[in-house]
Image (cartoon, coloured by chain):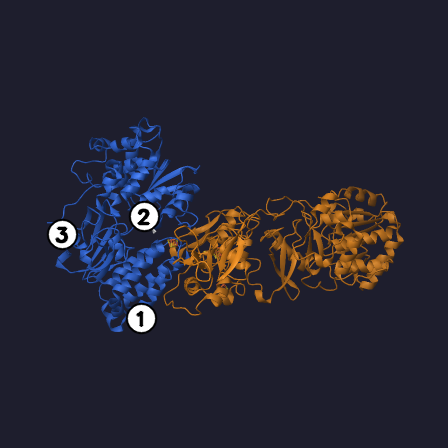
Amino acid sequence: MAKAEYRLILKHADEPGYTVDIDCYLSHGGYQVLKKALAMPPDQIIQEVKISGLRGRGGAGFPTGVKWGFINHEKNTKPVYLLCNADESEPGTFKDRQIIYKDPHQLIEGMVISAYANRAHLAYIYIRGEFAKGAEILEKALAEARERNFLGKNILGSGYELEIYVFRGAGAYICGEETGLIESLEGKRAYPRIKPPYFPAVLGLYMCPTIVNNVETLCHVKHIVEMGGAEYARIGTPNNTGTRIWCVSGDVNKPGYYEYPCGAITFGELLYEVCGGIRNGNKLKAVIPGGSSAKVLRADKKYKIPKKKEDGSTEIVEMGLEDIPLDFDTVAATGSMSGSGGIIVMDHTRDMVECLRNIAEFYAHESCGQCTPCREGSLWMKKMLDRICTGGGRPEDSKLLLEVANHIAGRTICAFGEACSWPVQSFVEMFGEEFEAKQRKESSLEILEPLTNRTA
Amino acid sequence: MSALIKNPFNHDLPPLEAPLVNVQLDGQWVKVPKGLNIIEVAKRFGKFIPHYCYHPKLSIAGNCRMCLFEMGMPKLDANRKPVVDAEERPVINWLPRPQIACATQATEGMAIRTNSKLVKDCQEGVMEFLLINHPLDCPICDQAGECRLQEYAYDFGKGRSRFVEEKVKKPKRVDFGPRIILDDERCILCSRCIRFAREIAKQDVIGFVNRGSYSTLTVYPGRVFDSNYSLNTVDICPVGALTSKDFRFKMRVWFLREAKSICTECATGCNIIIGSRENIVYRLTPRVNEEVNSHWMCDQGRLGFHYIHSKKRVTEPASHLNGSLFPLEWSEALRTVAQKLMEFPPSEIAFLVSARLTCEELYLVKKLMETLGKGTEIFSEIIPRKGVADGLLRSADLNPNTKGAIGIGIGKEGRRIEELKNKIRAKEINCLFAIHENPEEVGIQEDILSSLSFYVWQGLIPGPAVHKANILLAGASFAEKSGTMINIAGRLQKLHKAILCPGRAREDWRILRDLLLLVGVKERVFEKINDVFDAMSKEIDLFESLSWNTVGDLGIDLSQKLKNRSIL
Ligand SMILES: Cc1cc2nc3c(=O)[nH]c(=O)nc-3n(C[C@H](O)[C@H](O)[C@H](O)COP(=O)(O)O)c2cc1C
Ligand code: SF4
Ligand code: SF4
Ligand code: SF4
Ligand code: FES
């Protein structure tokens, strides 16, 4: 028997009869937490979020309470903006859309509470351009909320005022990077800003203090206020609190999204029990644990994971991929990351060079082109992989791929530099033999056969 | 005082009140103003951090990643006190990631490494990336020889390419505006030109389209980049992507002889470099002077020099007799002029002098008038030229040395042109000496000129009624002479001779000196322009205690003296 899901964020999303209408939301206790929140001093909400240990669900896992603490409200004289990052473009990730399409009011309630805590009176939902229907649903939900005075002037008699607008994204992955998002929202190309000096909390939207949070993150805030930070922190494990929605795609029998407390379930349990095992009875070969930019993990490798002992000291334990619990810290200890929660599964029939080529193609296409290493390096790596996959590989290509990737990571304006080089570094390091095989003359002939593994 | 153009950014000029902080630069502790960016910090101590997108007068883009350096901060103990080593030196915590120098500002205790292993690796990486899709058409590229890509490839690159894929193809000959051609394949996407257009020229019409390595610089559809400052983008473009239609394919830059001078197209007096070869001027480029033009100049000034090579130029002294022109020897021409000038009573002589002459020339004119006048004031006037000030560099006064003319005492700023006309008509003035001005320009046409008994014309390109001149003296253009001028803000600045005069034309100060000798001023013979300046500084109190050598390449501020005399 597979472990039962713990649905906090997706509690109602797939319930039969549950709709996006405000009445449905209200009949399920909707906007009650907002009432509670508006009776609390804003700083107390920030305090609860800090206590909850909530970490951002957008990719970096940054502690939300710490982020909110960056704005000094005593000194600040500028307006504060709250931006909801609904650009969800990391390949392998499809959790935010569940919330937007099925339970938009949960997001709005979370946003009003978060905006109130951060003294924002204007908030935007920056929604991925391709989510046309999602934008429509949100527009309607916002209108309903406005009508019931959950938005607008003097919300529920509290004296607090907030407006939320939907902004449809420009159809590029880079619009999800928070400073690119801000530029795009300002009507410009989504060129990420240099940090320093343009940290959103200091010089964000229109050079004002700005909080950017992921859709799922903002929904968690509602539950934190509802149950209290300390109670929320009991879900999951220390420093890995709350639930996470894992999006499983690839070679499993039952791909989909599954919500569990952090650390409550291992890769093995998720893939073999929850997702019904590897397709066609195949063998698991590799997993990308946190969206396509996360480093790939090899199924037959042992990972050295530091474990806290009773006495407070840490010891290093060896773990196979299947035993690694799904949380933030343990996955990070493998050298990869749980990122956006997009778990991409590859079985033994997969050609890893082809898989990397697919990923590299995405990043070469999505690099904004602003800074030299990422702009030139992402396309170079893609072209090299094209050549290797079409029979033109050379023995020196693996090393060159690595060196190009190493010249990008850590040297760019935004984390896209890592996003495009981590896959290359990890695929080449973990599956070096497959690259070498392809780069040998005799085997390059084999590759000219139809590329059956390539998904469309 | 600061530049006449207001730069939105001055990263190289920290505020004077900035306190000094201690930073460790490649192991040496030095003091620098707090907040100064690291490229400028390094520069102050003779170290060079290579950079493409950074420009001291433009906003920071941080996109080229050429300026990556290693940064550290002092390690602090639990009490936030710096930890020191056995030799009492602070222990540095080095950041694992390189930082960009252009966007990093000096703070107390910061440590900087500009040439560590990591820094060199970063530089090699960026150079390799910039070159993989570069067309490398250096042999036909105008930038070759002054190209940052070539220079840095040599200094910071690996010297070989590992790229075996096909290069990205982009448009090669894009009409980027009336004066500029863009080669998109050469563009390294540093965005300097975009920021210049937006922040300085205030014509925000250029930008990038497409993404990643296919990013392409372009002009907004339906708009043209025709700002009067557009050619500055050609200067600040680190590569050969932007080329001037005027200069393109005309001359390899390493053949250009460079002379420091100033632009004479308006009273701002932008500092320039005259690039010439074999007595032909090929281009003017701005020369940095933070008191005047900063790094810039206008397109009109930059392209305005072509008249100096005009076929219509008078290149030898000549006389007009019965409608025909006869070349003369200089000695003969000058003797005739001197003789004639001495024949007329001073009240019948008038000098129409250009405010485009140098102070030295004006001073010699003044001396000539005084000698001929023998106590009576000789009539003199200048021709004023009015344009429209554009709020950037161009001034409303289009004469480069009006202030000099007033200061030396030539003319009345053009207020007596009508009087001159009437006096010639009334035959009160019978001898006219026009120096670098055509009287026709102010309505003194053939009919009026016909009333003169003697008319001497000295200059470059004559007007339609020049056949009325009895003697023509071939003078020199701004590029052919040395001297000084006073700009609109009261700054005395130097011109330096870049090329020789064409034909038998002569520097005007030499012509005037010889006339002075001929009319009898023999107490001192000027050999060099320095002699004229030094004599001028003794006789004209505006220039008191100055000498040719004290007026440096960037000029000297005379605004207070001019204000005291109500000239400014
Ligand atoms: C290239 C790139 C793309 C990103 N795309 C997204 C995205 O689609 N959605 C998102 O929530 N965060 C995305 N992020 C992360 C955001 O920059 C930001 O960290 C996040 O929205 C913060 O929210 P959180 O603290 O709630 O996680 C992206 C980051 C990078 C570098
Ligand atoms: S790292 Fe890539 S995506 Fe990010 S700013 Fe640079 S070029 Fe753009
Ligand atoms: S821009 Fe520089 S490197 Fe490029 S072709 Fe011209 S001279 Fe050569
Ligand atoms: S044209 Fe020149 S200045 Fe403009 S972005 Fe390209 S390289 Fe930079
Ligand atoms: S000079 Fe271009 S990034 Fe610093």
Q: Chain of mark 1?
A: A
Residue A86 visible in rendering: no
| Secondary element type, mark 1 | loop
The residue identified by callout 1 is A394
N-term mark: 3 or 2? 2
Is A23 on the left-hand or right-hand side of B202?
left
Tag on residue B18?
none
The residue identified by callout 3 is A273
Q: Are marks 1 and 2 in contact (CB under 8 Å)?
A: no
Residue at horizontal 74 percent and vertical 58 percent from the top: B475
Q: Looking at the picture, which amino acid does disc 2 mark?
A: Phe
Label 2 C-beta lies within 8 Å of the nearest ligand 1 atom: yes
Residue A164 picture location, percent across and down:
34, 35
The C terminus of chain A, quarter of image: bottom left
What colour do you see for chain B? orange
Q: Quadrant of residue B189?
A: bottom left
Is B241 on the left-hand or right-hand side of B502?
left
N-term mark: 1 or 3? 3
In the depicted view, which residue is nearer to us: A181 or A10?
A10
| Secondary element type, mark 3 | helix
Asked if badge 3 and badge 2 are on a common chain, one would say: yes
Residue A173 picture location, percent across and down:
33, 50
What colour do you see for chain A? blue
Circle 2: is it few (<14), some (14-19), or many (20+) Cα within 10 Å? some
Q: Looking at the picture, which amino acid does disc 3 mark?
A: Glu
Question: In the rendered image of this protein, does residue B337 appear above or below residue A220?
Answer: below
